[in-house]
Image: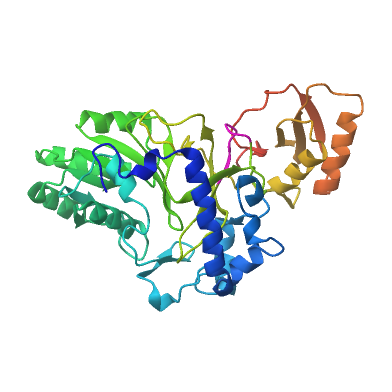
């Protein structure tokens, strides 16, 4: 039931109750899907589903990363054995660049976009202009499903044909816009050039950066615009609210922030990779690594929604780097950290000196005993099979930006 302030009562439920319900649903979902989902069985090998009672237990499960999907789907088409649903029983079979194939289930608002659209101010019987692509990819269908769940009428504009879109906007006068922020600016500029007034009052934008300068332009045009974080596999994972303080995690998802290249969560507030467990019967993704960086913000949102908040998109987590002809992965640096638990953050800095690649491992330590530097140099060589230097720095010195490997070599 849609209320004036919130999409439903789930948004303001007690966090402990939400957490218990999520993990009970997760165990039930695994029981139902396991026999028909070979990839899920491999992921849970040696792990009892009944043991997955909280986030600590969930860390037993290896992360499946988006960067692996193409290879997994090639081995087991079309969906890598990650869905128990037969292709013919799905609503749509979609294609993202790669190509990566994405299923869409038949339930209403399957992608979870209605909650984000509601938070942006859209309501039943609003006319909304959907400028996400409808061609093969999920974006247009994802947002249209949520708009329909709210009771909105949708102009399925898609991308391109800007003049025709402006003509339709002028006649149909949609009050809502859904699409990338930069295309919204293009539409506004075209309308202004033709002398037409913009009818837009609300917008939900995603899929591109929304810098402060562009935000101000949109405000000046009389539009209340909000951001959403969405992916083709997860739907809308988090969305901005009237509090304008981070993105609130969508209901029905378990979101973790993990150290890039590992299965281990980072302390709240540290930057790491966004990993999501999606509780969907048709596509039960367990610890899906998005490859995006973010961090958890402290406390609940001032808007009254009680779910976890993310700081928003903060870059990409894939930092695998070729050094001296060999790849070094963040997981190798994380393994060094596990051997020296008293250390703080670690960062491998890669540079060029005398026309050669040089590695320097920076390590936060409260007090450096005489042998620590030599021990870390040996551990770095053992992990990477290459020699590198070590610099001990004070705790809190290294930036909280999620970078485990910083490639500072000049771009040729």
Residue 86 location in percent, x, y? Answer: 45, 76
Q: Main secondary structure of the magenta part?
A: loop
| Furthest-right residue in this view | 371
Tell me where the magenta segment starts and ends, as one range.
267-274
Name the quadrant containing residue 245.
top left
Look at the image and tell me whether residue 284 can be seen.
yes
Give 352 or 66, whichever is nearer the viewer.
66
Seen at 65% across and 55% down, the residue is 51
Residue 218 location in percent, x, y? Answer: 26, 33
Q: Relative to 6, is 135 above or below?
A: below
Name the quadrant containing residue 373.
top right
Q: Relative to 183, is 62 above or below?
A: below
Look at the image and tell me whether residue 160 can be seen.
no
Give 235 or 207, whichever is nearer the viewer.
235
Seen at 49% across and 29% down, the residue is 299
45 relative position to 299: left or right: right
Seen at 74% across and 52% down, the residue is 325
Seen at 58% across and 73% down, the residue is 35
Residue 81 location in percent, x, y? Answer: 55, 71
Name the quadrant containing residue 226.
top left
């Amino acid at each position: 039931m849609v209320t004036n302030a919130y999409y439903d009562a789930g948004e303001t439920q007690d966090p402990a109750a939400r957490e218990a319900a999520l993990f009970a649903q997760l165990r039930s979902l695994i029981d139902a899907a396991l026999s028909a989902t070979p990839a899920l069985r491999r992921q849970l090998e040696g792990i009892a589903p009944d043991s997955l009672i909280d986030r600590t237990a969930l860390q037993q499960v290896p992360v499946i990363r988006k960067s692996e999907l193409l290879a997994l789907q090639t081995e087991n088409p079309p969906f890598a054995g990650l869905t128990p649903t037969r292709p013919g029983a799905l609503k749509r079979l979609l294609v993202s660049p790669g190509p990566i194939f994405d299923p869409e289930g038949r339930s209403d608002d399957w992608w979870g976009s209605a909650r984000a659209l509601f938070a942006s101010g859209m309501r039943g019987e609003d006319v909304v202009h959907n400028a996400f692509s409808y061609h093969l990819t999920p974006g247009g269908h994802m947002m249209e499903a949520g708009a329909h769940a709210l009771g909105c009428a949708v102009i399925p504009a898609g991308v391109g044909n800007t003049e025709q879109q402006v003509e339709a906007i002028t006649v149909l006068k949609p009050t809502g816009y859904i699409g990338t922020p930069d295309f919204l600016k293009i539409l506004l500029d075209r309308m202004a050039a033709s002398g037409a007034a913009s009818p837009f009052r609300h917008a939900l934008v995603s899929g591109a950066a929304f810098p402060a300068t562009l935000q101000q332009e949109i405000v000046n045009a009389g539009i209340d615009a909000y951001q959403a974080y969405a992916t083709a596999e997860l739907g809308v994972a988090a969305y901005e609210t009237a509090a304008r303080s981070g993105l609130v995690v969508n209901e029905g998802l378990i979101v973790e922030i993990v150290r890039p290249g590992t299965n281990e969560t980072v302390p709240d507030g540290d930057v790491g990779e966004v990993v999501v467990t999606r509780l969907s019967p048709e596509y039960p993704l367990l610890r899906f690594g998005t490859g995006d960086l973010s961090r958890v913000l402290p406390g609940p949102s001032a808007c009254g929604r009680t779910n976890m908040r993310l700081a928003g998109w903060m870059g990409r987590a894939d930092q695998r780097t070729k050094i001296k002809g060999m790849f070094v992965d963040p997981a190798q640096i994380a393994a060094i950290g596990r051997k020296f638990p008293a250390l703080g953050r670690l960062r491998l800095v890669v540079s060029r000196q005398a026309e050669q690649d040089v590695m320097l491992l920076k390590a936060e330590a409260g007090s450096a005993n005489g042998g620590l530097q030599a021990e870390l140099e040996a551990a770095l060589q053992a992990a990477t099979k290459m020699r590198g230097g070590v610099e001990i720095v004070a705790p809190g010195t290294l930036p909280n930006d999620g970078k485990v490997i910083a490639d500072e070599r000049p771009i040729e």
